Amino acid sequence: MADIRLEGVAHSYDGGRTWAVKPMTWTWRGSRAYALLGPSGCGKTTLLNIISGLITPTEGRIYFDDRDVTGVPTAGRNIAQVFQFPVLYEEMSVYDNLAFPLRNRKVARQEVDRRVREVSRLLGLEGVLGRRSRRLDPGRQQIVSLGRGLVRSEVAAVLLDEPLTVVDPALKWTLRSKLKEIHRDTGHTLVYVTHDQTEALTFADEVVVLKDGAIVQAGEPAELFLSPAHEFVGHFIGSPGMNMLPAEVVDGVVRVEACEVGAAALPAGPVRIGVRPEFVRITQERVSPGVPARVAGIDRMGAYDLVHALVGEHRVTVKTEAGAPCLPDTVEFLHFPAEHAFLFRDEVRCGALAPLNGRGQA
Ligand SMILES: Nc1ncnc2c1ncn2[C@@H]1O[C@H](COP(=O)(O)OP(=O)(O)OP(=O)(O)O)[C@@H](O)[C@H]1O
Ligand SMILES: [Mg+2]
């Protein structure tokens, strides 16, 4: 499977007034499963279509390994693409739909049969192989489309653009794990577009987070969770997202309101402290360093509690064990563990909160 390298690739639909994809240099490595994650309009589909050749980028070059494919049309790129909605020959049987991409490439009949049966077994389509596609419900039709994308074993990459949108939620889980299984078997390079973090995190070896046409961070799920490089990754990944608390750096000390919460080797000025709800500690006793906060409300979620506390007017959410002993309107103390608290300036991570080395406030 090929590495797919984008070099300075950018795309504008309006002659350069706005950019759907901003200049980007990035390699999709062969045989990996990627999730391309980002909100609506951030450029996910544009980027996929650039890889498949449906769109020629306004700027930059695309390589499959060392082969420059920038000017090569879709048909010459050997890519399988699955769209959000079913793309099928409605009058053909499910079997023929699945066989089509192989027959089209003159694959031997026995091999066609073997692949079709293999893919239909994995996707649970064995029972409908003889049926006309038109007679299936949209969810099933989409699974057939997915099968058409996965049936060829020699493709350079499989690109999936929110392929499970029309599929029943209960089936989504099953299909995602099937997809993972198929990926393990075939070793395709997979790029799976989604705006759903759960989908991205359960599916991918590596998650690429896109915002406003630019990659803000790429990494394994745990890396994005534990070490977000951009405020957007903090918000977008995690449930609830990362807390962001305005703070001030003065002489290497980070203060929230009047409290010292840690040290930072940064020039003086405003920062935001990012710390996930899972890692904030909340206690009734005064802690040092720590910040007083008024409990505004508690959501009892069953498996855990979410305590919403206010530091001044800024909300900090704390995820605690179920049955947190907090009461609304009481004052508690928040502590931000240095290893899990990061500092952001202009939305980009610029450092981490360091211990105060005994200089903490009383
Ligand atoms: N054919 C087009 N002509 C003009 N502008 C377009 C076209 N397609 C997309 N855009 C614009 O380009 C930007 C990126 O769109 P794109 O469809 O790539 O985003 P997306 O991340 O796939 O969004 P969604 O999650 O809604 O599918 C958006 O601002 C969109 O309005
Ligand atoms: Mg899209």
Image: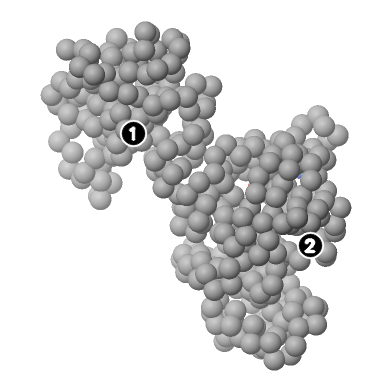
Using the numbered discs, state the Cα–Cα distance from disc 2 to disc 1 in whole angstroms: 44 Å
Q: Is residue 213 left or right of residue 286?
A: right
Q: Quadrant of residue 165?
A: bottom right
Q: Residues within 10 Å of mark 1 (few under 14, many from 20)?
A: some
Q: Answer yes or no: is residue 148 visible.
A: no
Image coordinates for residue 205, horizontal then vertical, percent: 50, 56
Q: Which mark is residue 67?
A: none
Mark 2 CB near ligand 1 (8 Å cut): no
Q: Residues within 10 Å of mark 2 (few under 14, many from 20)?
A: some
Image quadrant holding the C terminus, namely top left
Q: Residue at x 82, y 40 (%)?
A: 58
Q: Residue at x 43, y 22 (%)?
A: 272
Q: Which residue is mark 2?
A: 77
Q: Residue at x 53, y 49 (%)?
A: 207
The relative height of residue 248 versus residue 305 in the rendered view (above or below) is above
Dot placed on the residue nearer the N-terminal end, 2 or 1: 2
The relative height of residue 167 versus residue 22 in the rendered view (above or below) is below
Q: Is residue 242 left or right of residue 232?
A: left
Q: Which mark is residue 340?
A: 1
The relative height of residue 307 versus residue 44 in the rendered view (above or below) is above
Image coordinates for residue 244, horizontal then vertical, percent: 41, 27
Q: Residue at x 35, y 29 (%)?
A: 341
Image coordinates for residue 347, horizontal then vertical, percent: 52, 26
Label 1 sits on a secondary structure element that is: helix
Q: Amino acid at mark 1?
A: His
Q: Answer yes or no: is residue 16 visible.
A: yes
Q: Quadrant of residue 66?
A: bottom right
